[in-house]
Amino acid sequence: MAKRDYYEVLGVEKAASEDDIKKAYRKAAMKFHPDRNPGDKTSEEKFKEVSEAYEVLSDENKRAAYDRHGHAGVDPNMAGGFGGGPAGGANFADIFGDVFGDIFGANGRGQQRTNRGSDLRYTLEISLEEAVHGTKVNIRVPTLVDCETCEGSGARKGSSPVSCTTCGGRGEVRMQQGFFSVQQTCPTCRGKGRMIKDPCPACRGQGRVQKEKNLEVKIPAGVDTGDRIRLAGEGESGGAGGMAGDLYVQIVVREHNLFKRDGADLFCEVPISFVDAALGGEIEIPTLDGRVKLKIPEGSQSGKQFRLRGKGVSPVRGGGPGDMLVKVMVETPVKLNKRQKEILREFQATMDGESDGHTPQKDSFFSAVRSFFEGKN
């Protein structure tokens, strides 16, 4: 039976890089591996086929010979063909370990692994003023730290960890499955390569203890909800000489009773009186930097928006400050006394029957109403 093209077997182009070939083989081999398909002869044959293709295409010299002469260039039974087994003398176990070592946690060199501590997240709620101007906040974070008694070793003071008897201190064990040899993390020492025979009583051999850390967090000006501040090395201890993880402070900005924020801009609604809206005037409004005067033009309608440039937020990632957008809302007076009601009726009487454009929105609306009903006749 004629062999399929090796590039076709792995599903890659002829110009594929070494990484592309390795990724393609990893995917195919994991799919057809006998351990995942017990008793499936078809999968077993496909696994052998992709392994053979990888063995040739992963070797620079064999690949060059295959590109020039096809299968004849790498057939050991034919003149000019490469022999000596897979990958120029390497066996399938070597190929398997090279590609799948990281999946099973092996580092391929028999070295002890040092664990990195877990990263932690702390949600910090701050005010809008603190977010805009920046501040410093003290927080208490429960975490795992190196045991002071054993200095993180996990062994009782005066003793030391010993090499793991299962893996001989390598942190890995090799499992033979037929002609495959798989390296896995040692189940006894969990990859550390060491065992604690006389554990520290303070941490019970863990090398770490629970503790609350007091930390000062510097909040830069311009942060917003969703931003994270990374404190390197302030996460959980890795134990036994391992690096500590990081602490990520997640920012949540509380709602403000006056302002709403959208990126670099601030929004504020300000109630004004009917008289100020009609006659115009000057009102005092708040900003995060203090009070400012806002001039209201004569005849301003409810919902009119004014822009105060540069009174917004300077974003933490740079750029100029945003603006403050002020929407004025005309407030209808309530609880009027008898005289106030009389004055309003007198005022209303001066408006009735006139068409001088005092109420343009009202005039436009009722004009549209008339046109609507006239069209139905």
Image: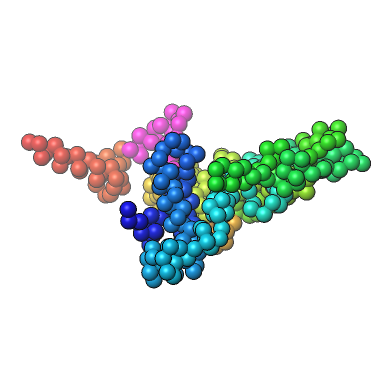
Is 290 positioned to the left or the right of 5 in the image? right
- Residue at 24 percent across and 45 percent down: it is 364
Q: Position of residue 83 (x, y in %)?
A: 49, 63
Please report the residue visible at 72 percent of the width from the left and 48 percent of the height from the top: 170
Q: Is residue 55 visible?
A: yes
**Residue in front for this viewpoint, 334 or 308:** 308
Q: How many marks?
A: 0
Is 204 above or below relative to 325?
above
The quadrant the C terminus occupies is top left
Foreground residue, 101 or 211? 101
* The one of 377 and 192 positioned closer to us in this rendering: 192
Reply yes or no: does residue 71 show up in magenta. Answer: no
The colour scheme is rainbow
Would residue 53 be found to the left or right of residue 348 on screen?
A: right
Q: Is residue 326 visible?
A: no
- The image shows residue 253 at horizontal and vertical percentages of 59, 43
Q: Position of residue 277 (x, y in %)?
A: 42, 47
**Residue 125 picture location, percent across and down:** 63, 41
**341 falls in the magenta region:** yes
- Residue drawn 71% across the image and 37% down it: 188
Residue 95 horizontal side relative to residue 343, left or right: right
| Depth order, front residue of 187/280 | 187
**Which image quarter: residue 249?**
top right
Residue span colored magenta: 325-348
Q: Residue furthest right?
A: 158
Residue 289, relative to residue 255: is it above or below?
Answer: below
Q: Does residue 308 appear to the left or right of 235 in the view shown?
A: left
Q: Residue at x 46, y 53 (%)?
A: 51
